[in-house]
Image: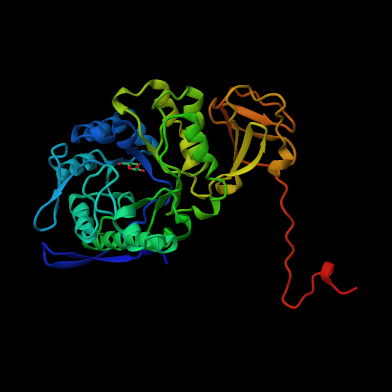
Amino acid sequence: MRLRTALLSVVLAATGSIAIAQSAPVAQTPPMGWNSWNFFAERVTDKDIRAAADQLVATGMKDAGYIYVNIDDTWEAERDATGKLHTNSKFPDMKALADYVHSKGLKIGIYSGPGNKTCGGYAASLGHEQQDADMYAEWGFDYLKYDLCSFIPDVMEKQAPNDKAAQMKLMIAAYEKMGKALQSATAKTGRPILFSLCQYGWDSPWEWAPELGGNAWRTTGDVEARWQSIYDIASQQAGLASYAGPGHWNDPDMLEVGNGKLSLAENRTHFSWWAMLAAPLLAGNDLPNMKPEIKAILTNKDVVALDQDPLGKQATRAYADGEVEVWTRPLQGGAMAVAVINVGSDRNSTHPFHLDLKKLSFVDNQTGKDLWTGKPIELTDKMPIELPSHDILLVRIDQPKRRIPQVRVIHMGEVPKQDAPK
Ligand code: GLA
């Protein structure tokens, strides 16, 4: 049973009355929002978070679905004698900040880790899991990113030196502990907290994270704002499709759209690929200075709808031909998305690439919508597709003509014909 959707009782201590609340299921589609790390890193302040919230509203990103405003690492100061963790001077009043973000109709996220220290060397939650979870809930937080980092030397390597299997068990137990702490905090306040595991894909988190309340888990190391990083991470998602679904998602890390020196094609492909993968869409760019062409990418309604498709099935790689990859994603109502990506760095894709409809289980030509031009497109067998380096053709086909695999029902006791004794 998914623990996070269970009935939760809420004790309203202030009034002495008792009410029963059902925690709303979170992350039924991949979480969307913005996170401070990819652009601001350790420089982020309260002011930047408020500005990001303002910009999500002003740019139309909120209307497009970007709801979470997530503070990453470097908000923490030290613990006092009671164990309470204080904020540093960059974040003078977390409750007021959460209230501000909520007043915009948005949600707010925070960051910690299971070790003594976060990746940035700030105080993390080891030994204070419940106390911290309760504090996030009191402040009004809706999302926790929980980052492994110093738990590796602090606990895993110390308690189980040279025993990788035992180290992984310790890691899983630490995530389970915080998962339970969040559930207990939610039971007190009624506010669900999305639980995002950040442990770089170690020990196949997709196999165990959903059971301990994980709504998303990183599948790889940190993304960087350069093509090779984006390509490597996307490639590592092949084979993970069966693990994602409503409430629990593979997380190939936050978006770098609009960051670094990514070309427009690379930004478009990065965003499209993450949408094909049903990935969390957490923008990580400088929102107050966002260029119109970057805003156009992040708010492309068709591509966002692809990411947020309610069926929740992520794309698989259908085939690769030289430097061109073709990925497909099944969508609600029998629709399909097809992405043709030129992953090569130095040439156009046309020659010798010709789309092979049979490899996509398509019969006949397909009529769809090109999600970047917004125009109808006909996919025909062996059609050459012209794509500049690192660019993408992204097509949604609402009524694909497909070869349906024949399934024969075999009744109990019946010997299938081909196996019958001669
Ligand atoms: C790790 C995470 C990043 C970011 C930093 C913060 O590297 O993977 O996403 O949270 O820590 O220190």
Where residue 255 appears, as percent x and y from the top left, is 41, 35
- Residue 277 image position (x, y, % from top left): 51, 43
Where residue 139 appears, as percent x and y from the top left, is 18, 50
In the rendered view, does 157 fall on the left or right side of 403? left
Q: Which colour scheme is used?
A: rainbow
Residue placed furthest toward the bottom: 413
> Is 368 situated left or right of 216 in this image?
right
User: In which quadrant of the rendered image does the C terminus lie?
Assistant: bottom right
234 and 150: which is toward the camera:
150
Number of marks drawn: 0
Locate residue 72: give its quadrant: top left
Residue at 46% x, 48% y: name it: 219
Can residue 200 be seen?
A: yes
- Residue 302 visible within the image: no
Seen from this angle, which residue lies furthest right? 422
- Name the residue rendered at 44%, 55% in the picture: 205
Looking at the picture, does residue 327 appear above or below residue 20? above
Q: Identify the residue at the far front of this view.
A: 162
Q: Is residue 126 left or right of residue 389?
A: left
Q: Is residue 11 left or right of residue 145?
A: left
Say which residue appears at 31% left-offset and 36% top-offset. 37
Q: Which quarter of the image is occupied by the N terminus?
A: bottom left
Pick whichever, 375 or 187, lies toward us.
Answer: 187
